[in-house]
Image: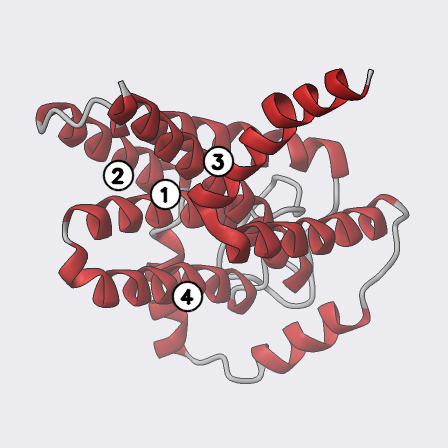
Amino acid sequence: MNQKIVNFWLHHVHLPLTTLIATIGIVGIVSCLFILFIVAELASEVIEKEAFVFDTSFLLWLHQFANPTLDNLMLFITNLGNPNIVAILASVTFLILLWRRYLQEAPFFGISCLGSLLLYSQLKLFFAKSRPTLWEQLISVKTFSFPSGHALCSLVLYGFIAYLLASHYPNLSKIIYPLAVILIAMIGISRLYLGVHWPTDIIAGYGVGYLWLMICITMLKLQKSRLNDL
């Protein structure tokens, strides 16, 4: 019996766990667990219809900086996370990957983008949280609020593109990743500035997007590792 337990541990627990740690590292695993905890807490509060005090106060504080120049800038930035723009960029990137014969990266990139679309659309329907209506908004959005689709999809799309670019141009990774983080963060801020999302929507969108992105990148790394071992 003891030998069976040992064999089960070695083959079904230890080996997969060791491979996972080697692929994304301890920091990656800890960060995913922490973000999973945050998302779960937010989701629980939303299900229970609890109000987040800082949601309203933060939006009202941010709105005091509104002016025509910032209006135009934020409208431009938020468009970079709109579904039509995201779909075009994702399609072009997918075709480029196929054209360049990156046949391992292309399927996982496609899965990540399609998965993010499915995640945010279904989660919105599940939680059915209303959007803020604290002031007259510059844009009209009819869908539910939680989590933010702009935050989720932009993190997955631009995050995966940044990962691919940094993988093929490692010397530029110190430039690529910060630029991607700034762009993704600005898209989230634009949604808050425009008053179409609560801060918790953005946090949850980033959280779910990060977890999904890490899953897809980890799957890609494991696939590459298996092929290299053949």
Residue type at mark 2 is Leu
What SS does tag 4 mark? helix
Q: As displayed, is residue 23 above or below residue 172?
A: above
Q: CA distance from mark 4 to mark 3?
A: 35 Å
Query: Depth-wise, is mark 4 or mark 1 nearer the camera?
Result: 1
Disc 1 target residue: 157
* Upstream in sequence: badge 1 or badge 2: 2
Label 2 packing within 10 angstroms: few (<14), some (14-19), many (20+) = some
In this rendering, the label closer to the viewer, 1 or 2 = 1
Provide the residue designation for mark 4.
186
The residue beneath circle 2 is 89
Q: Quadrant of residue 63?
A: bottom right
Q: Of the residues tagged 1 and 3, which is closer to the observer?
A: 3
User: Left or right: 168 with respect to 105?
Assistant: left
Residue 82: horizontal and vertical position, in percent? 40, 45
Residue pointed to by mark 3: 19
Whether residues under marks 1 and 2 lie with C-beta atoms below 8 angstroms apart, the answer is: yes
Label 1 Cα crowd, 10 Å radius (few <14 / some 14-19 / many 20+): many
| Viewer-proximal residue among 97 and 218 | 218
